[in-house]
Amino acid sequence: MIANIKDFFNQFIEPGTRPNEAGGAHALQVATAALLLEVMRMDNRITDAERAAIGMVLRQQFGLDADQYETLIALAEQEAHQANDYYQFTSLINKTCSAAQKNIIIENMWHVAMADGHLDAHELHLMRKIVDLLYISHADNIAAKQRARNTAKLPPA
């Protein structure tokens, strides 16, 4: 099920590489894309604003060209649709990414969750799950959420 992501990771990640090296960057791209797609699907209303937020986040964060972005999204969509749970994504992230990279993922997820102008209860529930699975501190999560809220120009909760 998650074989394509593992193959992608194995293609770019040499044994013993650290998260801040090139392999970690590729792992972060795939993992981030899969989780961003999960946030977008969570409220059962996929909007153009959410799709645009995913595109902006991935292109801006990782400097992807159009072909790289399309390849990444296709792979992530396939894996996200086949996933039974989030642990398979978060365990890969925990093995591959630094705490700083995991905080980036959470902030990017908040950006997508807020892209349509509101936070759905299902989105909030997903965010709590992922924050716990990635071992993100409460303070880091709240800071990421606030930065995303400010960017989206949403009123304080």
Image (tube, rainbow, N blue to C red):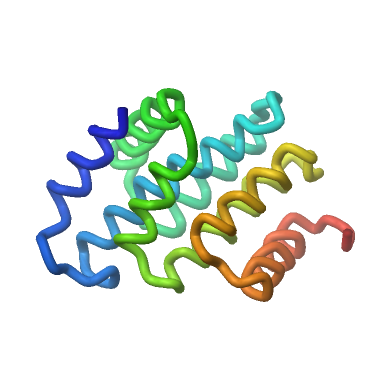
Horizontal side of 92 relative to 3 (left or right) equals right
Q: Looking at the picture, tell me which residue is in the foreground, 150 or 100.
A: 100
Horizontal side of 96 relative to 129 (left or right) equals left
Q: Looking at the picture, tell me which residue is in the foreground, 58 or 92.
A: 92
Quadrant of res 69? top left
Rendered location of residue 100, percent (x, y):
45, 73
Look at 52% across and 48% down and name the residue there: 56
Look at 27% across and 62% down and name the residue there: 24
Rendered location of residue 98, percent (x, y):
37, 71
Look at 58% across and 58% down and name the residue there: 132
Quick one: quadrant of the C terminus?
Answer: bottom right
Q: Looking at the picture, tell me which residue is in the foreground, 85 or 39.
A: 85
Quick one: quadrant of the N terminus?
Answer: top left
Above-or-below relation of 114 to 49? below
Horizontal side of 18 relative to 87 (left or right) equals left
Look at 33% across and 52% down and name the residue there: 92
Quadrant of res 34? top left
Above-or-below relation of 2 to 65? above
Rendered location of residue 83, percent (x, y):
43, 30
How many marks the image carries: the answer is: 0
Rendered location of residue 31, percent (x, y):
39, 48
